[in-house]
Image: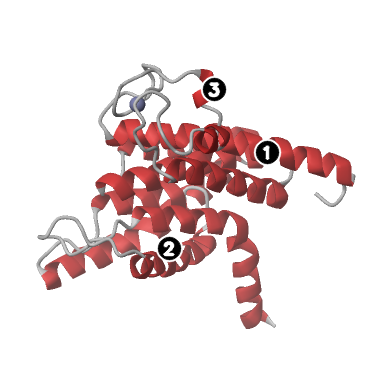
Amino acid sequence: MLHLSAALTAYILTITALLGLVLGSFAACMADRVAAGESFLRGRSHCDRCGHVLTPRDLIPVVSWLALRGRCRWCGAKIPVRCPAAELLCAAAFVGIVLRYDVTLQTLQYWILTVLLLATALVDYDTAMIPDGFLLAMAADWLMFLPLLHRGAVGAAALRGLAGALAASVPLLVLVLVMDRVLKRESMGGGDLKFFFAAGLFFSWQSVLFLLIASCLLGILFALASSRTAGDPENPKAFPFGPAIAAGVYLSLLAAEPAMAAYLRLFLL
Ligand SMILES: [Zn+2]
């Protein structure tokens, strides 16, 4: 965004951050409802404990939480700190995208993907399940923007996306099938594989390499950083992999192409 004046840049970044806060709140709400098995399209936002419908002044991202000191206005139930945290994270992620891709259709597509990644990560963290609906929404986000972003070369772009999706999921699927045979247990959830497929649509197969490495490193980091060991005792995969994949996808949106170009240049020069 170097071509813009400083004032206009500041204005765009402020609007972007506010939009990120609001949509981060939306993602957290959507995740809570899906994790609880409720419809996220019907019904107004309400307190999980007392069921009181929230008023507009309870729904201002971060500000409401701080003003109420993290408690419900009516029953005093604690509102988890992850609500404002998810909002702030989404705001930062939105700013990152607009700094990288400017005010473009590409930015809009990646903002939508970011909201879906956040919601998916939250649901997987809570329930160790990755909702198919969110993955389908990611695929729809990819499909919807194909003709808008690649006018005149839609076919080539579609093939590139499908190659990315297959590159992100097929080698892992083979690995998982072999590991399952060797270990005689499930080594990786089917949801994780579907997540890699849906996310792979957004990348070339070269960038998928970056995505896989980033996701795995983040997965190890998250598992080490988290003391969480609860879960199915039959399945030693105690820490859900979804949040790491989501973070890996986001990192790849920002850095995969320049990183892979630099990496390939090592061999070509
Ligand atoms: Zn309440």
Q: Secondary structure at mark 3?
A: helix
Residue 228 falls in image quadrant: bottom left
Residue at mark 2 to residue at mark 3: CA–CA distance: 38 Å
Judge whether 215 appears above or below 30 on screen. Answer: below
Query: Depth-wise, is mark 2 or mark 3 nearer the camera?
Result: 3
Q: Earlier in the sequence, mark 1 or mark 2?
A: 1
Kindly identify the residue that appears in the image at 35 percent across and 57 percent down: 169
The answer to whether residue 129 of the structure is visible from this angle is no
Question: Are the residues tagged 2 and 3 within 8 Å (C-beta)?
Answer: no
Report if the beta carbon of the residue with label 1 is closer than 8 angstroms to ligand 1. Answer: no
Q: Amino acid at mark 1?
A: Thr
Q: Nearer the viewer, residue 223 or 165?
A: 223
Q: Secondary structure at mark 2?
A: helix
Which quarter of the image is occupied by the C terminus? bottom right
C-alpha separation, residue under disc 1 versus residue under disc 2: 26 Å
Q: Nearer the viewer, mark 1 or mark 2?
A: 1
Comparing marks 3 and 1, which lies closer to the viewer? 3
Residue 141, compared with residue 204, is above or below; it is above
Could you tell me the amino acid type at mark 3? Arg
Q: Considering only vertical position in the picture, is 199 above or below 59? A: below
- Seen as rendered, the residue at the extreme right is 5
Q: Amino acid at mark 2?
A: Ser
Q: Which residue is mark 2?
A: 215
Q: Nearer the viewer, residue 232 or 180?
A: 232
In this rendered view, identify the residue nearer to me: 84 or 74.
Answer: 74
Residue at x-position 50% and y-position 39%? 115
Q: Position of residue 11 (x, y in %)?
A: 79, 38
Give the x, y percent position of residue 38. 28, 26
Name the residue tied to disc 3: 57
Whether residue 181 is visible here, answered yes or no, is yes
